[in-house]
Amino acid sequence: MPAVPNPPTDNDLSSEEKQKLLLKQIQSLQKLQTAFELHQKGQYEQAREFYETVIEADPNHFDALQLLGALTSQTGDYERAIECLTAAIKIEPTFAEGYNNRACAYRSLKKYEEAQADFNHAIALKPFYLDAYYNQANLLHELKQFDDALNSFNQVITVKPDYALAHFGRGNVFHETKQYEQALECYELAITHQPNYPEAYNNASMVLVDQRQWAAAIAVGSNALSLRPNYDFLRGILQHAKMNICDWGDYAASIKEIVSRIESGEKTCSPFGLLGLVDDPVIQQRCAAIYTQSKFPANDVLGEIPQRPRSSKIRIGYYSTEFHNHATAYLIAEFFELHNKEQFELIAFSLGLNKQDEMRARLSASFDQFIDVSDQTDLDIAKLSRALQIDIAVDLKGYTADRRTGIFAFRAAPIQVSYLGYPGSMGADYIDYIIADRVVISEAASQYYSEKIVYLPHSYQVNDRQRAIAKKVFTRAEAGLPEKGFIFCCFNKNYKITPDTFDSWMRILKATEGSVLWLFQGDPAASENLKAEAQNRGVSSERLVFAKEIPLAEHLARHHLADLFLDTLPYNAHTTASDALWVGLPVLTLIGSSFASRVSASLLTAIGLPELITSTVADYEALAIELSQDPAKLQTLKQKLSNNKLTMPLFDTPDITNHIEAAYLQMMTRYWDDLDPANIVIEPNTAEG
């Protein structure tokens, strides 16, 4: 803290005036001291009041200005931080720390040019200013200037090899560029130099999650949680990791705590991770809103998009990391090909790695423009979208892996839509619409969505009728299945299997002599845990058979070995359900309350098999058992499925394409008429042109 300042020596001041001035300065110093102590204790609101009082009395009080600048930056009031630090720099132009702190505030506001200039100024004033080098490196990372970022981090480490933050920063760059082993090495170095470093443990855990090393991710992430019990979103991420290996040891207590924390407004779980844990659209929307506000708050740095006049051709931007061999691409490929190119101009924004495969080649040919923006920042992509005058920006990712929600936080287009990738509300005011249907989102449930709902007349899920099925005829022996007996199957990812679902499955197996359950083989630990859980429920582990991952066309071909697909709750089969129906395998589902728990019901309704939708656990189990013991009834269902495959709406790709285009036209009509977004209901056979 500064020493008591000397009073002015102006000879014109009387002795009494000098005393008053000195008293005023002492009072300011006392308030400043109080503010500083409160600041150090984390009592930010009270500290700010004292700082502001000092500045009100003396607008040129350097210490109060620079300290308030630091505090307001800490608490997210970046505009006020910049005001204070600018005033402090004006008083003391060589104040290197002020330039560094102001640069950090500019960076938080996505004012990257101003931030870069201030970092350069700070370093020019103080050549060995390691914090400025470190912060500048983080800025370069955010700008996706990865090599420059690494060089800056390396400069810091050269001067100070034990600078843990720089090792941590290098790890973050390697993580984003998917150089996972190098990232882990950097995080280990950071922890070596700073043993109690929760951020390093957390980020190392996230690398392990990306590598699907679930057990290791849980162990490392638990270290972060022990150091910081309220670490943002980590508790839910670790529970999701446990679900991937079917580790249900503390399942009920963990879910209860996660829900309680979300209800209290805590940053506990990512929206995607919650879908497989809780069947409650209220909690899911609350979780998404918390996540959005924390990670991707709305940002108006680009200003409002000027109103655009009516146009005969609407520009649709589709944003995804999955324009290659991936579940989303398998569903949507034909939809892009069938788009009406007279009414719509299609532009793909490819956000992921440039994977050159047959699906990417097929998709690229479907668009008027296919732009690889994987090396651009969210802000740059939003700017590009505006420059290209995208009318409707369609996010095909939502809160799934490698999300780029920040693009839409900057408002990439006048209308922004969530579709297909994420089955739930984004909890973001800047996502205007979600494309759904009356099964996945009932009208009563629409209140739990921040978006306006587009109700398609049939299932929301688009499908590709060109999905290839290999000609190879698999035998039961090849799949490790018994030569006789009923084959139940579920090819959902392991994280969708809950203890309650597994309880039902085991009761079904017990009631169906000689039957087996054929499951997707994920992590080896998951298979072992499921076998143990079966034994604990009195079912031989030999009655669980695990399907190895093989190319999609072959996987579809081996479906014929199964008799009935058993769905999961609260996260249904989505692509896996449509795969099964496409190859003629009936899917039995238990409908829930949330979007993710009603997708299979949507698909079954659209293909004319509502009799396979159950609403209670007892009915689900009873129907599974009945179908396993009544071959004639099962065969009737299979024949009905075969008959309906190309006559019912589910696989009528031209029909759903027309319906989505009709929705786009209604969105734009409302926009052109200067009306706010509203729920849109598309009637069957609607095709506006």
Image (tube, helix red, strand yellow):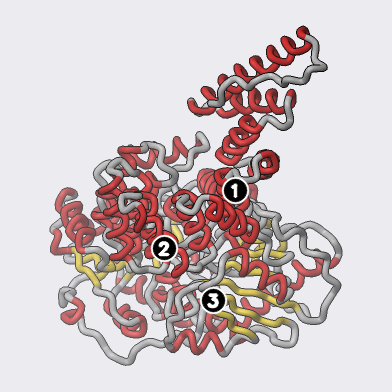
User: The residue under label 1 is which amino acid type?
Assistant: Tyr
Task: Report the residue marked by disc 2.
Answer: 173
Q: Is residue 466 above or below residue 34?
A: below
Which residue is at 28% across, 65% downward?
181
User: The residue under label 3 is which amino acid type?
Assistant: Ser
* Label 1 to label 3: alpha-carbon separation: 36 Å
Task: Report the residue marked by disc 1.
Answer: 99
Secondary-structure class at tag 2: helix
Q: Earlier in the sequence, mark 1 or mark 3?
A: 1
Which residue is at 71% across, 70% downward?
386
Task: Inspect this view and state whether residue 219 appears.
Answer: yes
Are the residues at dot 1 and dot 3 in contact (C-beta closer than 8 Å)?
Answer: no
Which residue is at 55% across, 82% downward?
647
Are the residues at dot 1 and dot 2 in contact (C-beta closer than 8 Å)?
Answer: no
Other residues around mark 1 within 10 Å, as few (<14) / some (14–19) / many (≥20): many
Q: Is residue 161 above or below residue 264?
A: below
User: The residue under label 2 is which amino acid type?
Assistant: Val
Other residues around mark 3 within 10 Å, as few (<14) / some (14–19) / many (≥20): many
Q: Report x, y in % for residue 232.
A: 44, 44
* Label 3 to label 2: alpha-carbon separation: 20 Å
Other residues around mark 2 within 10 Å, as few (<14) / some (14–19) / many (≥20): many
Task: Inspect this view and state whether residue 501 appears.
Answer: no
Q: Earlier in the sequence, mark 3 or mark 2?
A: 2
Disc 1 vs disc 2: which is toward the camera? 1
Which residue is at 36% across, 54% downward?
159
| Residue lying at the far front of the rendered structure | 11
* Label 1 to label 2: alpha-carbon separation: 24 Å
Q: Earlier in the sequence, mark 1 or mark 2?
A: 1
